[in-house]
Amino acid sequence: MSRDQAHGDVFRIGFTVLDRQIVDRDGQYVGKTDDVEFSWEEGGPPTMTALLTDSAALGPRLTGPLGRLWRTMLNRLRPSEHEPVRIPVNDVEAFSPTTRLSTPVPEGSRTLENWLRRNFIGRIPGARR
Amino acid sequence: MKWVTAFTLGLLTAIGGCLDIGDLVANSIVGSRFGMSLAWVLPVGIIGLMLFTEMSARVTAVSGRATFDLVRERLGARAGLANLLASYFITLLVLSAQMGGIALAFELASGVHYLLWVPVAGVLVWIVLWRMPFEWMEKSYGLLGLALVVFGVALWRLSPDWSGLLASATTLAPPPDEDWSVWWYYAIALFGSAMTPYTVLFFSSSGVEEEWTAKDLGTARVNIFFGFSLGLLLALAIMACAAVFLMPAEVQVTDLDQVALPVVSALGRLGLVVVIVGFFAATFGAALESGLAAGYSVAQYLGWSWGESVSPSRTASFQTVLLLSLLVGVLFMLTGINPIKVTEYSLVLSAAALPLTYLPIFVVANDRGYLGDRVNSRFTNILGSVYLVLLVVVSVAALPLMVYTKAGQ
């Protein structure tokens, strides 16, 4: 397990990475870290390679009836080939207290936000005050 | 001078945020049925509200994050989601009740049936949320809400038997014709009205929007203390008015008419005008706050950008949730369900859900990762723990008592 240099204690993914707010380099909200991606070579230890952000990525992490409901609902609401947004760990500047990226808002994130802005909220007079 | 303005404005906000349709209805009903025998619940509730609002103001000022924003981080995705769903549902019910309250205030002023006013109320609330900057919003309804001081004036003009009121307030038992279970049921409703969770959600999120820092903490504390104390006095005045005027006349509170009755009888037409302004300000302000609280909680759980002062086009999802919540509230009230009953149920359900809001605040306020050395003091923690036990007891007792007493009949 890797050590967090700043605090000298164990770096716990469940505590420091998952469910934290992600902001881009300008402080714009990207979303929450809904899940993480691990990769490993044959025989090597698994390492965290990416953060996944997308409300659908949250589904598999919720157990029980609440998780089932979440998954069914979101599967109905989106195109079937939809994949969660993947943010490589190298793009992360800091994990705590907020996960800050060194890049602008990653492509493909905030689909709902953009759709609603174009087709609904942006069309109401006064939306750009 | 600037400090003085900030102080008065904050004070107004605190008073405005402290009184809503729930307080108007609960205090009147309780006063008219039980005299002052449940008055003790109000200070207990308000002290709890002060305690936890201060914690959440501290979290916001030091970490720059709203309380609900941290709930998911600290409770995890699953417990956070369950919390979100319960809080959102209850806030929605409270929002509906406030819109019913606005409509009833309009009915009182115009004589036109309240159902016709419900959509008007919904549209007005939405326009204000859409167009008005934050500060303006708070100033206006805070200032207008002061009209409720008229209950104090009315109480004085009714020249009650003060020692009798005090004796009633120190009798910790229901009047002979009422049941203990009903007495306790209303104690819980009253507690729920004093500790309304959406106030804290709103307060901490607005702190983020106004970019509080640790420097603003002093002002925030003063505002919380004085504003909520004034709110407590007003709530007591409403209850006392009902106890002095409605109880002997055996008037049942089924509408805002009866809530206003003591004022009207003491101060006449002018009193009625002032009290309607007060009703409108209190319910309208609370509708704005609870609507925003509903939007904030969803946006903060899912990590969307949110904010009242940000251009709506940059917070499209948040604005959509606001709009949908208002729409659902309006439709719900348009079913013709009695707004006073909705208010009562919203209070008892709020009481049942109190730990959901206050436990996470308590946990975060003890986290050095966010607060450094500004974590809760030992005294705050002892008092906070006592309150958490109380909140759990209230929460467990609320629904069984509701069923057993048939919602206080």
Image (cartoon, coloured by chain):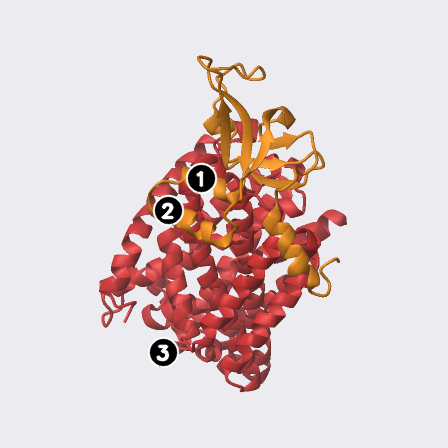
Chain colours: A orange, B red
Q: Is residue A80 left or right of residue A107?
A: left
Can residue A18 be seen from the camera position used here? no
Q: Is residue B110 left or right of residue B249?
A: right
Check the image and report above or below for B202 versus B22. above
Tag 2: amino acid? Arg
Check the image and report above or below for B269 versus B102. below
Q: What is the secondary structure assignment of the residue under circle 2?
A: helix
Check the image and report above or below for B255 versus B77. below
Q: Give the labeled residue for mark 2.
A: A68
If the image is split into quadrants, where does the C terminus of chain A sit?
bottom right
Q: CA distance from mark 1 to mark 3?
A: 46 Å
Circle 2 packing at 10 Å, graded few (<14), some (14-19), many (20+), is: few
Q: CA distance from mark 2 to mark 3?
A: 47 Å
Q: What is the secondary structure assignment of the residue under circle 1?
A: helix
Instruction: Tell me where residue B351 appears, x and y as whole percent.
Output: 37, 55
Q: Give the labeled residue for mark 3.
A: B252
Tag 3: amino acid? Gln
